[in-house]
């Protein structure tokens, strides 16, 4: 049975919002304003917190955000690094992957590139406890699916 203190401290979740916002692009404009505005969340507090957490990334780097909105108009958010496909396209200098992966290879990367991407992805909250070898294998599989030879 819950005590009164536990009931008062427990906040009920109104929604989970997932956004992809460019680094240094969090401002009171789409896509941030419509997503947060409908839950009456403080836009300026989100923008300041977002900008404080992503200072090490270059502008226009797509950052994946997960925002948990509570019914008392407060929120918490986590930021993940850009997707593996974005890193692979940047490393290969491509706009998009091959139209026919497995038949036509668009580019080739070395294991050093894969290792560097894996080191960055290991800092994500979801990959934090995965071994580096497993992350590298996942990145190689993604590269093969994009038509990039490793």
Image (cartoon, rainbow, N blue to C red):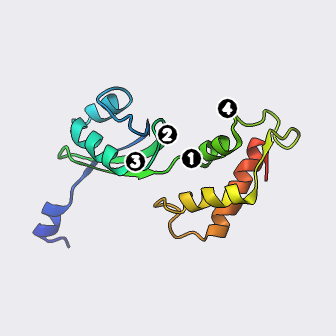
Give the mark nearest the N terminus, 3 or 1: 3
CA gap between label 3 and label 1 equals: 14 Å
Give the mark nearest the N terminus, 4 or 2: 2
CA neighbours of label 1 inside 10 A, class few (<14), some (14 to 19), many (20+): some
Q: Quick check: marks 2 and 1 in contact, CB under 8 Å?
A: yes
Kindly state the secondary structure of the residue where label 3 is placed. strand
Reading the image, the residue beneath label 1 is 83
Reading the image, the residue beneath label 4 is 95
Q: Establish if 136 lies above or below 47.
A: below
In front: label 1 or label 4: 4
Reading the image, the residue beneath label 3 is 66
Q: Quick check: marks 1 and 4 in contact, CB under 8 Å?
A: no
Reading the image, the residue beneath label 2 is 62
Q: Position of residue 114 (x, y in %)?
A: 68, 57
CA neighbours of label 2 inside 10 A, class few (<14), some (14 to 19), many (20+): many
The residue located at (21%, 47%) in the rendering is: 74
In front: label 2 or label 3: 2
Q: Position of residue 53 (x, y in %)?
A: 35, 51
The residue located at (20%, 60%) in the rendering is: 10
Give the mark nearest the N terminus, 2 or 1: 2
CA gap between label 4 and label 2 equals: 15 Å
Q: Establish if 96 lies above or below 49.
A: above
CA gap between label 3 and label 4 equals: 26 Å
């Amino acid at each position: 049975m819950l005590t009164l203190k536990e009931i008062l401290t427990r906040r009920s979740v109104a929604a989970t919002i997932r956004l992809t916002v460019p680094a240094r692009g969090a401002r009171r404009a789409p896509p941030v304003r419509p997503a947060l505005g409908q839950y009456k969340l403080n836009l300026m507090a989100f923008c300041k917190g977002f900008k404080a957490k992503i200072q090490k990334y270059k502008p226009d780097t797509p950052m994946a955000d997960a925002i948990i909105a509570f019914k008392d108009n407060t929120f918490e958010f986590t930021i993940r690094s850009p997707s593996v496909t974005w890193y692979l396209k940047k490393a290969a200098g491509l706009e998009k992957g091959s139209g026919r992966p497995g038949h036509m290879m668009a580019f080739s990367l070395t294991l050093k590139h894969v290792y560097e991407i894996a080191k960055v992805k290991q800092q994500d909250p979801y990959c934090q406890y995965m071994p580096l070898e497993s992350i590298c294998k996942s990145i190689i599989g993604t590269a093969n699916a994009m038509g990039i030879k490793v």
